Amino acid sequence: METEKLKKALTSQISLEVKQDGQSRLAAVLIVIYGSEPTIIMTKRPKTMNLHAGEISFPGGTRKQDDNDLLTTSLRETKEEIDLNLLRQQIIGQLNPVTTLNSGFTITPFISVLDEIPKLNPNSEIETILHIPLIPFLSTIEDDPDPSHKSIQEMYTFRYQHHLIWGASARMLKQIINLLSKNEIT
């Protein structure tokens, strides 16, 4: 897959307006795809974490009061968690916000497609950084069989090696599939 086609399919208007419903906490993640054979970065959180322990997710986290907007949150958290320092100009789009099932977050995902990345270094919030070949990974989509996960909307799962990706991260990946299909990229 050509990087330019991928960039075109995932490029969208970035809205820096913060929409707060008063019920959920705001968070943002950064979906980083890199390389001539598109590879997506995900992280595994340690089992010792208070929230989302042991889960696979994108780098990101909760908006802090001094973050100007959610894009700032995603860039700051990505730098803190995996030592990847990106500029605002390197963000090409965003997906629709998703709400977590249990922890009460509304997460805004931003997207960056890069030719290459430097060596990444996880902080204590990250057990492992996963570099996942994008297209084979997206083809593992299945409906989430857990009936308790169906309470808010359609739910999906993805698999990479022995890892199961579900919940908010899986709904973000489904949005990527929809964008790639719409642009006839698979």
Image (cartoon, rainbow, N blue to C red):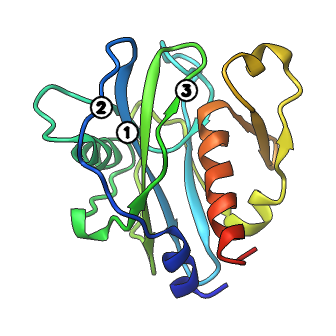
Task: Establish if 138 lies above or below 99.
Answer: below
Answer few, some or many: residues within 10 Å of disc 3's Cα (few below 14, many 20 plus, some between 14 and 19).
some
Secondary structure under tag 1 reads strand
Compared with residue 80, is residue 121 higher up or lower down, i.e. above or below? below
First in residue order: circle 3 vs circle 1: 1
Residue that label 3 marks:
46
Identify the disc placed on residue 28: 1
Left or right of residue 85: residue 114: right
Q: Which percent across, then down, holds residue 161? A: 81, 49
Residue in front for this viewpoint, 29 or 59: 29
Task: Residue type at mark 3: give it.
Answer: Pro
Name the spot of residue 15 as percent of width and height, x first: 29, 51
* Marks 3/2: CA–CA distance: 30 Å
Of residues 17 and 159, the one drawn nearer to the viewer in this rendering = 17
- Foreground: 163 or 111? 111
Of the residues tagged 3 and 1, which is closer to the observer?
Answer: 1
Find the distance from the CA under tag 3 to the CA under tag 1. Answer: 19 Å
Residue at 75 percent of width and 58 percent of height: 138
Looking at the image, which residue is at 44% across and 70% down? Answer: 11
Residue 59 in percent (x, y) is at 44, 44
Give the mark, 1 or 2, whose residue is nearer the N terminus: 2
Report the amino acid beneath label 1.
Answer: Ala
> What residue is drawn where x is 46% and y is 71%?
113
> Which residue sits at x=69%, y=66%?
133
Relative image position of residue 66 (x, y in whole percent)? 10, 31
From what the image shows, is residue 181 above or below residue 169?
below
Q: Secondary structure at mark 2?
A: loop
Q: Amino acid at mark 2?
A: Lys
Residue at disc 3, secondary structure = loop
Q: Residues within 10 Å of mark 2 (few under 14, many from 20)?
A: few
Residue linked to disc 2: 19
